[in-house]
């Protein structure tokens, strides 16, 4: 199979270039990550990427594959048109080859205070939550922070410092939706300016690319409604 | 970067100082970090991947605690099951400690926000797992607390969030190289490498905790993430310290070849069965009653024996087939949709029409860095077999406290992480309070690590890391897998000796300082080598079969000679032993009995 891969090592290269690799690999049953690691192991050990779980749960290997963001480890080779064009996640500074600097995403994640707040004295047993209440968090807690969504979002490209982006906003809503959390108001305050939440224009790129099938746009919509309801 | 620059690094790596440094951002490391940050200490967490990329994220089934939300339960029964599951090799004081504190540890996670699944009455959802009983061996218990089939993900993200809240200092994507020690053997921190810039760093701390996880990548077929390379174990061996019970590796009978992804036992529960290349349902020979649903170790061993006897399937004869097409498309789509997806994705077969190729797959390391129940690393010394190494702690899969003994029960690992993560945190807090002053770090403390690093700057032609890694993994799978005999293991050690000399001839083609993953893989390979050797040598020494360590030439458990732990040190491949702690903290001991289910 033929691959065309984005290469850039700031120590050696003045600017990035695409490098072509021809690899003898059976597409059946193999993922893009298998091909990339095979290239690294057998053709060119300098090819640089992140990987860990190799089964779509750790969020390490988000990249741009034939123009669309996804996880290399669960993207079947058989589904890919050749030459397979692989680039780093767009909109983020490239450190080397397919490795991007995730700092903007991590900072926005931190900015929504992604932790449970409950000031009541801790009971001796668990805080009760009905299955229905728990179901409010379905589609939110599964996020693996791969960044595929935010890096596909034009609003995030333009304002990575001011717009929280779909990944961070999904996390914000995860705590608003949690019946155990007592700080929904504060969380909404935190999003109430022209940028943090409202820069989302509902383009839905985030939903299209999310490898876990999550829907940040819906979460964003719900928070917008909540803000409107309380008289934003 | 020229040689001159590197020498400058050797002489003067940047230094940072903390009260405590934790190597590892998985469940164990993050639980300990939280305890320390919460107490106002300055704590640094060093992780070679962003913490939520750690292997804990992959755990599915759940975490055990006798909450009794579904069936009556109490920690005494949990303790009994764990002792028996360990094939009596687990230390009963540590097991009592873990089971006694399980409920509060899990409740604490819930209070932190872990999104557990729920029962109708609002309490935490629990599911039954193998080896769980009521009333000391009675009816099946339901003890595993679960967040759908993503418990590890939920646990890891929750702990990470709590650490963000507590303002733990993270060194994300820093690779720890070696321990810093002084002449008296005190551990004073670690040397690390910033992966992004290639700059070495000295992190000084009054307490150092290793939480580097498992090393399943010593085997060719492993359910473990790529990053599970036993780095903490390598650090300990290079410091001249011992590893405990390294012969005990849990193999899961049904993993996918290549990817190693797990195919759940549920497939056989639904009526699937294993066949060899003659189409024979061979489990009928090995376990006439339970057949394909015999114990994990029994089935894994049978699969290995069939392959070894030349009855393997596939072009290379190196797999066994898991047949389920006779179950019919409807049942497969209804009951096993996830498995079908996995098989389609990772093996390219649709189990509705074709069998799934499987191999016994390395899953969990029961052995590791010996500790007591405060997480202090302990070694044989002048006054006994278990003297704390000052300043050094270990928790999680890299540690051996030992609650899993010769065989881990499902759901007990996540529990181990949080119970002992917290206990180690508490002990560090106390110790630091009593010893407020740092010892002097000798000028030369980082030298060993930096020399090791420099070795990878050599240029020129040589073998490559990936080839050696694959050879090593294949060797371990063949010579120290589920199927072990003296001859096989001696051949394995001889082959490893040869491979070791080849390691010296490996050269990197990548000499960039920027995010050089080729160099990281080389450093990981060094760790894989020493862990593999520890495993082989320990396995050869233990002339009995117990739990996951099954020897064809010594098929019986031998309590007279082997009711004890092995300790391996690198120098001369030395094996020592120490007694199992059969005395619990407060309750009556569970005396060794024959283990039948
Ligand atoms: C597929 C699968 C399913 C499982 N399911 C369950 C289950 O349902 N229930 C259960 O109880 N157990 C389960 N287990 C076992 C359990 O998940 C692991 O034992 C446990 O998560 C290990 O946690 P840890 O914190 O010790 O290490 P890890 O989570 O592996 O973390 C290790 C950390 O150390 C860091 N590290 C390692 N080396 C270095 C270095 N050189 N420098 C810097 N940092 C380093 C890594 O970056 C990482 O942050 C499962 C295991 C597998 C493979
Ligand atoms: S929402 Fe989806 S795409 Fe975005 S970070 Fe989470 S898992 Fe990745
Ligand atoms: S829907 Fe909003 S968050 Fe998602 S891609 Fe579009 S602008 Fe970005
Ligand atoms: S390697 Fe973990 S998500 Fe792909």
Image (cartoon, coloured by chain):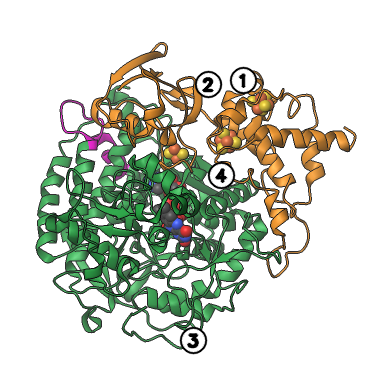
Chain colours: A orange, B green
Placement of A10 over or under A145, stated as above or below: above
Tag 1 or tag 2, which sits nearer the N-term? 2
CA–CA distance between discs 4 and 2? 28 Å
Rendered-image quarter of ligand 2: top right
What residue would you read off at disc 3? B587
**Discs 3/1, front:** 1
What's the chain of the residue with tag 1?
A: A
What's the chain of the residue with tag 4?
A: B
Q: Are marks 3 and 4 on the same chain?
A: yes
Q: Residues within 10 Å of mark 2 (few under 14, many from 20)?
A: many
What residue would you read off at disc 2? A90
Q: Quadrant of residue B74?
A: bottom right
Placement of A46 over or under B414, stated as above or below: above
Q: Secondary structure at mark 3?
A: loop
CA–CA distance between discs 2 and 3? 60 Å
Q: Is B349 one of the magenta-colored residues? A: no
Residue B463 seen in the figure: yes
A97 vs A55, nearest the viewer: A55
Q: Which mark is residue B582?
A: none
Q: Residues within 10 Å of mark 3 (few under 14, many from 20)?
A: few
B408 vs B341, nearest the viewer: B341
Q: Are marks 2 and 1 on the same chain?
A: yes
What's the chain of the residue with tag 2?
A: A
> Residue A188 location in percent, x, y?
79, 38
CB at disc 3 and ligand 1 closer than 8 Å: no
Q: Is residue B305 left or right of residue B402?
A: left
**Residue range highlighted in magenta:** B447-466
């Amino acid at each position: 199979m033929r691959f065309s891969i984005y290469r850039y090592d700031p120590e050696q290269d003045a600017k990035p270039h695409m490098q072509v690799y021809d690899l003898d690999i059976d597409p059946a049953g193999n993922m893009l990550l298998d091909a990339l690691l095979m290239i690294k192991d057998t053709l060119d050990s300098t090819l640089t990427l992140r990987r860990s779980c190799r089964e779509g749960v750790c969020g390490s290997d988000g990249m741009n594959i034939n123009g669309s963001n996804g996880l290399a480890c669960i993207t079947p080779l058989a589904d890919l048109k050749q030459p397979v064009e692989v680039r780093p996640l767009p909109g983020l500074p490239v450190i080397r080859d397919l490795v991007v600097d995730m700092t903007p995403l991590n900072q926005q994640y931190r900015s929504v205070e992604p932790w449970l707040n409950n000031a009541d004295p801790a009971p001796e047993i668990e805080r009760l939550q009905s299955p229905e209440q728990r179901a409010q968090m379905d589609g939110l807690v599964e996020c693996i922070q791969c960044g595929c969504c935010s890096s596909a979002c034009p609003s995030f490209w333009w304002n990575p410092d001011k717009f929280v982006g779909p990944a961070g906003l999904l996390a914000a809503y995860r705590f608003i939706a949690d019946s155990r959390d007592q700080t929904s108001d504060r969380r909404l305050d935190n999003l109430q300016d022209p940028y943090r939440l409202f820069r989302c224009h509902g383009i839905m790129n985030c939903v299209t690319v999310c490898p876990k099938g999550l829907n940040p746009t819906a979460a964003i919509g719900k928070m917008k409604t909540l803000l409107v309801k309380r008289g934003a | 970067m020229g040689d001159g620059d590197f020498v400058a690094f050797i002489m003067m790596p940047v230094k940072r100082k903390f009260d405590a440094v934790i190597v590892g951002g998985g469940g164990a490391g993050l639980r300990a970090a939280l305890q320390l940050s919460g107490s106002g200490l300055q704590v640094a967490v060093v992780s070679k991947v962003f913490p939520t990329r750690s292997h804990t994220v992959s755990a599915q089934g759940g975490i055990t605690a006798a909450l009794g939300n579904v069936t009556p339960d109490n920690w005494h029964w949990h303790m009994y099951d764990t002792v028996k599951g360990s094939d009596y090799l687990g230390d009963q004081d540590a097991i009592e400690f873990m089971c006694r504190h399980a409920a509060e540890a899990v409740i604490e996670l819930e209070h932190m926000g872990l999104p557990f699944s729920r029962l109708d009455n609002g309490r935490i959802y629990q599911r039954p797992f193998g080896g769980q009983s009521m009333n000391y061996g009675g009816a099946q218990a339901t003890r595993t607390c679960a967040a759908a089939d993503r418990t590890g993900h939920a646990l890891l993200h929750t702990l990470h969030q709590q650490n963000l809240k507590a303002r733990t200092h993270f060194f994300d994507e820093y690779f720890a190289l070696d321990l810093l020690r002084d002449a008296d053997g005190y551990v004073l921190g670690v040397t690390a490498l910033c992966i992004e810039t290639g700059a070495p760093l000295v992190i000084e701390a009054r307490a150092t905790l290793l939480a580097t996880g498992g090393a399943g990548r010593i085997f060719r077929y492993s359910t473990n993430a790529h990053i599970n390379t036993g780095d903490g174990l390598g650090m300990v061996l290079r410091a001249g310290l011992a590893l405990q019970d390294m012969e005990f590796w849990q193999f899961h009978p049904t993993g996918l070849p290549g990817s190693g992804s797990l195919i759940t036992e549920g497939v056989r529960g639904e009526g699937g069965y294993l066949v060899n290349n003659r189409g024979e349902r061979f489990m009928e020979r090995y376990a006439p009653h339970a057949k394909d649903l015999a114990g994990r170790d029994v089935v894994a061993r049978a699969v290995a024996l069939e392959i070894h006897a030349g009855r393997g399937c596939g072009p290379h004869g190196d797999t066994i087939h898991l047949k389920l097409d006779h179950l019919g498309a409807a049942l497969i789509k209804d009951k096993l949709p996830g498995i079908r997806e996995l098989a389609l994705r990772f093996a390219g077969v649709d189990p509705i029409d074709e069998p799934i190729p499987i191999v016994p797959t390395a899953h969990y390391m029961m052995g590791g860095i010996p500790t007591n129940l405060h997480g202090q690393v302990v070694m044989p010394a002048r006054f006994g077999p278990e003297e704390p190494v000052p300043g050094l702690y270990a928790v999680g899969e890299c540690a051996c406290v030992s609650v899993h003994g010769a065989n881990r029960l499902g759901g007990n690992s996540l529990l181990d992480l949080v119970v002992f993560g917290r206990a180690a945190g508490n002990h560090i807090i106390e110790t630091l309070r009593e010893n407020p002053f740092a010892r002097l770090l000798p000028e030369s403390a980082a030298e060993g690590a930096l020399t090791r690093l420099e070795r990878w700057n050599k240029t020129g032609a040589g073998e490559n890391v990936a080839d050696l890694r694959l050879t090593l993994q294949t060797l371990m799978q063949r010579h120290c897998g589920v199927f072990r005999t003296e001859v096989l293991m001696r051949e394995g050690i001889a082959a490893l000796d040869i491979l070791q000399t080849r390691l010296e001839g490996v050269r990197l083609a990548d000499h960039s300082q920027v995010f050089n993953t080729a160099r990281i893989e080389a450093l990981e390979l060094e760790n894989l080598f020493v862990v593999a050797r520890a495993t082989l040598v320990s396995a050869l020494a233990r002339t009995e079969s117990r739990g996951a360590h099954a020897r064809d030439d010594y098929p019986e458990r031998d309590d007279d000679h082997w009711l004890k732990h092995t300790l391996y040190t690198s120098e001369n491949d030395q094996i020592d032993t120490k007694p199992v702690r059969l005395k619990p903290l407060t309750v009556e001991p569970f005396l060794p009995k024959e283990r039948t289910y």
